[in-house]
Image (spheres, helix red, strand yellow):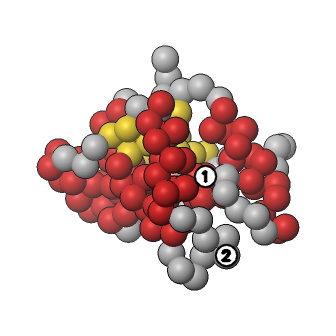
Amino acid sequence: MTLRFLDTNILVYSLSRTPEDQWKRARAHAVLQEGGNALSVQVLQEFYVQATRPSARHLISHEQTLVIIAEWKRFPVQPMTLEVLFEAFRIKALTGFSYWDSAILAAARALGCDTVLTEDLSHGQVVEGMRIVNPFLPAA
């Protein structure tokens, strides 16, 4: 099965209750229901921080967040390892991306993903054999 890696923004939009994010929320839910998704511990950590931070528009509790994260354990989850860390350093040096975006790509690569779904990088760009896809762009 071909895997596609989900960045944190997809998980965060799946919880958004703001009117301007309604379409992105629906799209994030659809993505989460499709097969072949993969995550990393980093993505789950970032989601937790965003979902429970006091300034979040729709703060959810620590307990609610843990229940949601437990549901996402159904996806392959790449742990943070020294190999992933040093691969992120290599990708950062190669691309000039932030460390955090490079760590996303390193985790996706470690899982054998061919696609990374994110709105944070350039749609259509190919990095290390992985295609970057913004799932929130209107269909052409």
Q: Which residue is drawn at 61% across and 52% down?
A: 10
Q: How crowded is mark 1: few (under 14 residues within 10 Å), some or many (20 or more)?
A: many
Looking at the rendering, in which quadrant would you find the C terminus? top right
- The residue furthest bottom is 55
Asked if residue 46 can be seen in this view, the reply is yes
Image position, residue 75 (x, y; %): 47, 32
- Left or right: 2 in relation to 97: right
Image position, residue 34 (x, y; %): 65, 29
Q: Tell which of 35 and 17 is nearer to you.
A: 17
Compared to residue 1, the image places residue 4 above or below, namely below
Q: Residue at x 50, y 23 (%)?
A: 2
Name the amino acid type tagged 2.
Answer: Arg
What separation in Å lies between label 1 and label 2 (alpha carbons)?
16 Å
Asked if residue 4 can be seen in this view, the reply is no
Location of residue 89 (image quadrant): bottom left
Q: Tell which of 128 and 112 is nearer to you.
A: 112
- Left or right: 112 in relation to 85: right
Compared to residue 7, the image places residue 18 above or below, namely below
Q: Please give the residue where the numbered disc 2 appears in the rendered image.
A: 57
Name the amino acid type tagged 1.
Answer: Ile
- Mark 1 falls on what kind of element? helix
Q: How crowded is mark 2: few (under 14 residues within 10 Å), some or many (20 or more)?
A: few
Compared to residue 116, the image places residue 55 above or below, namely below
- The residue furthest top is 1
- Left or right: 98 in relation to 84: right
Q: Residue at x 49, y 17 (%)?
A: 1
Q: Please give the residue where the numbered disc 1 appears in the rendered image.
A: 10
Q: Which mark is nearer the camera, 1 or 2?
A: 2
Q: Tell which of 8 and 69 is nearer to you.
A: 69
